[in-house]
Amino acid sequence: MGAADQGLSDDEVRGIREALAAGRKPKVMFTAAAGQIAGQLGQVVELTDPSVSDEFVVVRFGRDELPFSPADVAMAPRGAGRRPAESKVEAAPAEPVAAEPEFVLDQVPQPRREEPKVREESKVEAAEAKPARRAVKATKPKGPAGLTVTLAYAEGEWTVAAQQGAKALAKPYVVKPAEALRMVALVDVPGVHEAVEQILAAERAEAERQAEKLRAELAEIEARLAELREAS
């Protein structure tokens, strides 16, 4: 396998990025991974963000600027794309009028005696192959972040909190036991219902005990107040 079939290395990608920053557009040759257009030349016009898509090498090919992966292209050999002036003159009359022009490049070496019919079919096949490639690797839009609503019980209080992704939509705030019970009723899980009923039963028992204690203290205070009234 030659160097032109191995795609771009990391060092070559960095070199292309530096060349673009200096205003140059490096020539590349399409490898076998590019399919029908293997062996043809193009110019790198931009490097996009590789973290967004594997096809971040934007190559000008004819009138189109299309994205490719580093495996699809390699650095063009020295002198590639140069032709004598007379070869351009001879190639011009052989171009079919009805052929699609988007893949006709001046720098691509063309055989002098190639039949027009063969060249026309090659262009049509290349034009049909590229849209299919882009459709397969279209980037899917990201969906919204997940939403989490939490109902919690701790130290005698029920609280509710809401969070979307890493963003807190609502900090924990206190809700009444009856509201908590209605929320739990929406969850059809028997174990959850039983746990909530046990908590509420324990709270009721504690509240009744506190109320009984307060009633006894109030009765004692009222008796003491009656004795003071009788003595005055």
Image: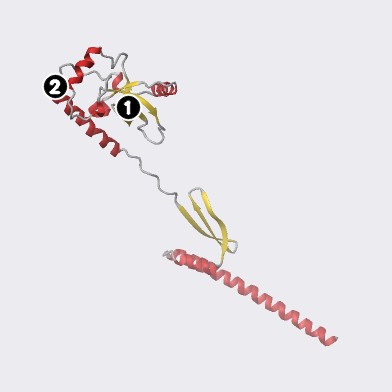
Q: Nearer the viewer, residue 35 or 206?
A: 35
Left or right, 134 with respect to 22, comes to: left
Relative height, residue 34 to residue 166 (above, below): above
> In which quarter of the view is residue 57 placed?
top left
Left or right, 185 with respect to 203, comes to: left
Left or right, 200 with respect to 187, comes to: right
- In the image, residue 203 lies at what x, y percent? 58, 69
Q: Residues within 10 Å of mark 1 (few under 14, many from 20)?
A: many
Instruction: Give the residue number, with chain letter if any, for mark 1.
Output: 60
* Amino acid type at mark 2: Glu
Disc 2 is placed on an element classified as: loop
User: Coloured how?
Assistant: secondary structure
- In the image, residue 173 lies at what x, y percent? 57, 60
* Amino acid type at mark 1: Arg
Disc 1 is placed on an element classified as: strand
State the residue at coordinates (40%, 22%): 16
> In which quarter of the view is residue 38 placed?
top left
Viewport quadrant of the N terminus: top left
Q: Earlier in the sequence, mark 2 or mark 1?
A: 1
State the residue at coordinates (78%, 82%): 225
Viewport quadrant of the C terminus: bottom right
Q: Residues within 10 Å of mark 2 (few under 14, many from 20)?
A: few
- In the image, residue 94 lies at what x, y percent? 17, 21
Q: Nearer the viewer, residue 151 or 225?
A: 151
Question: Separation of disc 2 and disc 1 at Cα?
Answer: 26 Å
Instruction: Give the residue number, with chain letter if any, for mark 2.
Output: 115
State the residue at coordinates (26%, 33%): 130
